[in-house]
Amino acid sequence: MYIKRIVAICLFCVFSAQAQVSITAVNGSKDEIKIKSDLESLHVKYNLAPWVYTEKIYVDDGAKTPHSHPVLTMSTQQEYLNSKVKLLSSYLHEQFHWHVIINGKPTKKAFRARIKTFFPNVKTGYPYGSKGEGSTLTHIVVCYLEYVALTKLIGEEEARENLSTNGYYTWVYETVLNPKNKQILDNLLVEFGLALSEND
């Protein structure tokens, strides 16, 4: 029992040092508590601090899907209960929505217009993108950031496998995973002030 307490304290200290996030299981359900625990363990396993843009996190089994605003909220869908990689990927995705809003240089209109100059033929609606063109264009950048960060954490092969098997934003992920688009997307991140540091 003593050893277990020491281990728990050590894990808590490491987690706290990595990123000051507050994760709340909204309803206290079994699935919410599992997702909360898995998120905490991911913060221990990986240094996610460079990519934490909002520290208040909810886990809510009433949420149909994860979403970033007004509070970053993770859902308890089976894919996240079954796979920590899927959970990690989706969590980073929602954090990067905050990154775009907090740190992005242009206005939303200019931001989306600039992306469209390179990707004019946008596929919208499920499963290709978001409901509207503007949100789908934003997701090109968000999903590319997700890919870049995930590659740093788990390697390119596993990152590509994870994103290419998502059943949503399929056109967006095909676009960001296409090697022909890498330089364009890297340049856009720099232009928008959203590039991730090499040390992250």
Image (cartoon, rainbow, N blue to C red):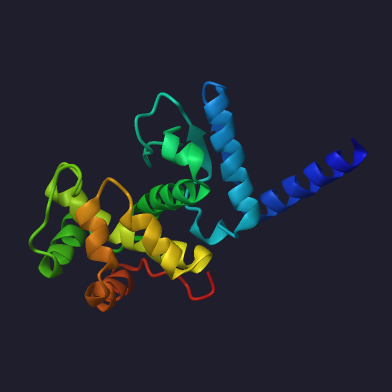
Question: Quadrant of the rendered structure where residue 28 is?
Answer: top right
- Give the number of marks: 0
The quarter of the rendered structure image containing the N terminus is: top right
Q: Is residue 57 above or below residue 16?
A: above
Q: Between 82 and 173, which is closer to the camera in this rendering?
A: 82
Q: Could you say where residue 163 lies in the image, as x and y percent from the top left?
A: 35, 56
Q: Could you say where residue 80 lies in the image, as x and y percent from the top left?
A: 46, 40
Q: At x 49% / y 76%, what residue is drawn?
A: 198
Q: Between 22 and 63, which is closer to the camera in this rendering?
A: 63
Q: Could you say where residue 71 lies in the image, as x and y percent from the top left?
A: 43, 36
Q: Is residue 4 above or below residue 45?
A: above
Left or right: residue 59 compared with residue 22: left
Left or right: residue 174 compared with residue 35: left
Q: At x 74% / y 48%, what residue is drawn?
A: 11
The answer to whether residue 114 is seen in the rendering is yes
The residue lying furthest to the left in this view is: 121
Q: At x 31% / y 57%, what residue is drawn?
A: 164
Left or right: residue 181 compared with residue 142: left
